Amino acid sequence: MKQQYKIAAATREQTGRSASRRVRKENRVPAVLYGKHTQPETISVDGPEFIRLLKAIGGSSSLVEIERKDKPVALSFIQEVQRDPITDRFLHVDFQEVKADEKMEINVRVVAAGEAYGVKTQNGVLEMPNPYLRIRCLPKDLPSFIEVDVTNIKIGETLHVGALKTISGVEFRDDKNLPVFSCVAPVEEVASATSGGAAAAAPAAGAAAAPAAGAKPAAGAAAPAAAPAKK
Amino acid sequence: MALAPSRTKYRKVQKGSRKGNAKGGNTVAFGDYALQSLTRGNMTGRQIEAARVTISRHLKRKGKLWIRVFPHKPITKKPAEVRQGQGKGPVEYYVAVIKPGAVLFELAGVPATIAKEAFRLADAKLPFHCRFITREGANV
């Protein structure tokens, strides 16, 4: 059984924007705990404690034990964390309760193991179109990350879900043709951006300056120029 | 060449509103690192191109760059020395309306230090306060 983390939670009586704001003002994070066999419960967790928990988890998929007053410990995982995109403040957390003896579905982060051949020798870029994969497993079989060996990927090649090594007790739920890693050639800077860019900018500037110099003559000059073009 | 729509449904648009924060396109979606705007304003096609050239020159053909904004909005301007009235002026250029939180560029396939410097140089070309952000769980 992999390491389980713990966090203390308090029951949240009131819901809604105002109540949530009051909770956040007390340096706590509003949260919800739900599961297949339980009723959803609004809770709140201590802000600094939650940050410590996230740092300890470090992006991996892990199980968290939620300790509440007068209630049994709830085994869960973090389903979603909402953050303010500008201030990075934690707004809300979703915990999904699971049973130790029941299979669950969870998104697990994909990690590249090794350096791709295309990156090392062909100056390519390793792309990860889907950083998370959906898996189904028992809580005891939950992997922290899905490590994928990318050393043999060359430029133009793609590794799909179907080609991944099987992990004991873990079932991939995504489509077999879903790309996980692909190695692509770096997009070269267009030559005109360096030399032609200045040349291209010049006519644009000229075109902008023409109407500025005199509105009516420029408009008159533009009309005959445009007329033959239509033919 | 500056970015501009190839075809528009309506030639000219009203000024519109820039209030509020970016509701979408405010997270790192494609790459590992991103440049996020912290203030609001218009980003012209030329500014996008200038920032793109700056980033790609600094990367020296390494990595992959995503441009997350596109100048959809036409901006008109009356010619010089023209009296007021006689209708709205011709379209001069196109802008992307940027609100706080909008992700402007994303990068992948380069070390964080190089991405940070590339974005710092690009930021100097833009009329916004920007910050460097990373994807959650990205190896920094």
Image (cartoon, rainbow, N blue to C red):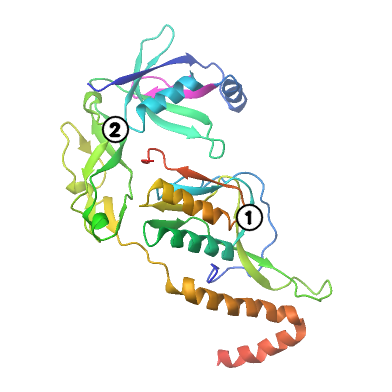
Q: Is residue B20 above or below residue A61?
A: below
Q: Nearer the viewer, mark 1 or mark 2?
A: 1
Query: Which mark is drawn over residue B127?
Result: 1
**Which quadrant of the rendered structure holds the C terminus of chain A?**
bottom right
Left or right of B86, for residue A174: left
- SS at circle 2: strand
Please give the range of residues in magenta. Answer: A28-43
Q: CA distance from mark 1 to mark 2?
A: 45 Å
Mark 1 belongs to which subunit?
B
**At 62% from the left edge and 25% from the top edge, which residue is drawn?**
A18
Whether residue B70 appears in magenta in the rendering, the answer is no
**Which quadrant would residue A189 be assigned to in this image?**
bottom left
Q: Nearer the viewer, residue A211 or B12?
A: A211
Q: Nearer the viewer, residue A96 or A23?
A: A23
Q: Main secondary structure of the magenta part?
A: strand
Q: Around disc 1, counting alpha carbons within 10 Å, would you say few (fewer than 14), some (14 to 19), or many (20 or more)?
A: some
